[in-house]
Image (cartoon, rainbow, N blue to C red):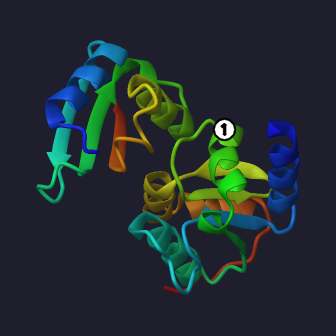
Amino acid sequence: MALDQNTLIELLAQGLPGADIRIEDLRGDGEHYAAHVAYEKFDGKSRIQQHQMVYQALQGKMGGELHALQIHTSIKK
Amino acid sequence: MENIVFERIKKEIATDDIVLFMKGTPVFPQCGFSAAVAQILGILGVTYHSIDILQDSDIRQGIKDFSSWPTIPQLYVKGEFVGGCDIIREMYEAGELQQLFDGKNIAYNKVG
């Protein structure tokens, strides 16, 4: 069960309001994505916490509908 | 039920300085993300204990609840969750994983 790119962007935008989000479909198969997320509130958080915030925005879909998502986080200036 | 699994997980992460929960084994990884972390640990030449979560459905779900982390692989150093594939790769490339090992007195291969 794949998750389409627009749904992915919507979920991230809702969960991380104001973040810059860029999604890459790594293999063009709708199953392997990379998400580049720049977000102000990542400031002061560890990498683990930043990724956990991204996972939270995905509302449990990671590891379920979404098998492969590379996450690259950075702090939005 | 959860407590029994958490106790097992705590015991597992205490068995070695470095413990990797992965799909498959370091020699026969069953997922590219697990393979990538095993490869980094291999390059660094550290010894580690690996657990194949595909062989154990309790651990497979339990480890995700334990760390509030939804994916495998998961790397633990001295009992502490360090990250999944992306984080370990970023840390390795930035030399931060090596710094972490230095800080925890874990020997690794500094050449290459």
- In which quarter of the view is residue B14 placed? bottom right
Residue A57 pos. (x, y %): 40, 23
Q: Does A6 sit left or right of B77 as displayed?
A: left
Residue topped by disc 1: B65
Q: Of residues A31 and A1, which is closer to you in this image?
A: A1
Q: Does B96 sit left or right of A58 as displayed?
A: right
Say if residue A16 shows up in the picture. no
List the single residue furthest toward the left: A28
- In which quarter of the view is residue B17 placed? bottom right
Say if residue B112 shows up in the picture. yes
Residue B94 pos. (x, y %): 45, 59
Which residue sits at x=53%, y=25%? A44
The secondary element bearing badge 1 is classed as helix
Which residue sits at x=68%, y=48%? B63
Which residue sits at x=74%, y=77%? B107
Q: The N terminus of chain B lies in which quarter of the figure?
A: top right
Q: Does A36 sit left or right of B11 as displayed?
A: left
Three-letter amino acid code of the residue under disc 1:
Asp
Q: Crowding near pointer 1: few (<14 within 10 Å), some, many (20+)?
A: few
Q: Mark 1 lies on which chain?
A: B
Residue A77 pos. (x, y %): 29, 23
- Above or below, B41 against B84 in this view is below
Which residue sits at x=73%, y=66%? B18
- Above or below, A15 against A61 in this view is above
Q: How many marks?
A: 1
Residue B99 pos. (x, y %): 63, 61
Q: Of residues B41 and B11, which is closer to you in this image?
A: B11
Q: Of residues A63 and A34, which is closer to you in this image?
A: A63
- Above or below, B105 against B73 in this view is below
- In which quarter of the view is residue A35 placed? top left
Q: Does B13 sit left or right of A60 as displayed?
A: right
